[in-house]
Image: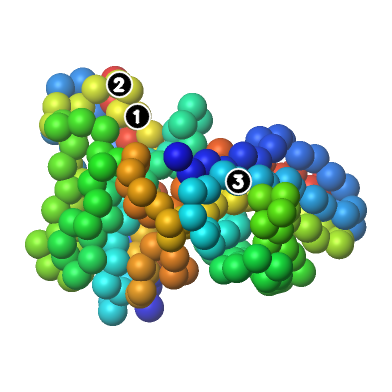
Amino acid sequence: GDSVTQMEGPVTLSEEAFLTINCTYTATGYPSLFWYVQYPGEGLQLLLKATKADDKGSNKGFEATYRKETTSFHLEKGSVQVSDSAVYFCALRDFGYSGGGADGLTFGKGTHLIIQP
Amino acid sequence: DAGVIQSPRHEVTEMGQEVTLRCKPISGHDYLFWYRQTMMRGLELLIYFNNNVPIDDSGMPEDRFSAKMPNASFSTLKIQPSEPRDSAVYFCASSFEGPEDTQYFGPGTRLTVL
């Protein structure tokens, strides 16, 4: 079945540091890929997405490139801020999906990011 | 728009009791999703609706769980009887065009079953 694997953390960085959160996936079809962010006490919000190979999603200084050859969708930001502290979820929707579990988004476990001033 | 609204925000109940969680999606969104979030299993999709009709409920853990959407602006997730292992945060989300479209999440209901 489909799955998403990401580092769980916590990942602790200093303000203005470079950020990479790794995400790899397995899928039976042709997935769209997503990054969602969850701030403390809130629901998830879409951060960015990419729908086909080599697409780059970007938003709020964050970027992720859909790499089909390495089945990866790593999240990067050049200079993080304290306000970026949150839990980040990588997810996929597999359009070639068949069987096993609900046909919706498959999420990773989430990566807890802590940015220190 | 007020966003997706969930109630209650927190629920503490005793094992064996019935629990009902409520959700109001964003107006105009045709899709509604129920998720469960736990430390052990992460975020799991339980069921989703399109135009008030359940499309896929294969994520619902067992017969104790049921979900309804009587109209476009209201959905419930019911657990009867509840068990301690049901303790989790339950999120409702809605989208305009389907699971691959941007999903807007509510703030969640934190359920504790004693």
Q: Say which amino acid is labelled 2.
A: Pro
Q: Which chain hosts label 3?
A: A
Number of the label disc, if any, that sits on residue A117:
none
Vertical placement of residue A40 versus B71, above or below: above
Q: Which chain hosts label 1?
A: B
- How far separated are the C-alphas under marks 3 and 2? 32 Å
- How far separated are the C-alphas under marks 1 and 3? 28 Å
Asked whether residue A35 appears in the rendered view, the answer is yes
Residue B90 in which image quadrant: top left
Asked whether residue A117 appears in the rendered view, the answer is no
Q: Which residue is mark 2?
A: B84
Name which residue lies at 80% across and 40% down.
Answer: A12
* Left/right of residue B36 with respect to residue A110 in the rendered view: left
Name which residue lies at 69% across and 37% down.
Answer: A7
- How far separated are the C-alphas under marks 2 and 1? 6 Å
Residue A47 in picture, x, y percent from top left: 61, 64
Residue B45 in picture, x, y percent from top left: 36, 46
Q: Say which amino acid is labelled 1.
A: Ser
Image marks 1 and 3: residues in contact by CB distance under 8 Å: no
Of A79 and B112, the residue lying toward us: A79
Q: Which residue is mark 1?
A: B87
Q: Residues within 10 Å of mark 3 (few under 14, many from 20)?
A: many
Image marks 2 and 1: residues in contact by CB distance under 8 Å: yes
Q: Residues within 10 Å of mark 2 (few under 14, many from 20)?
A: some
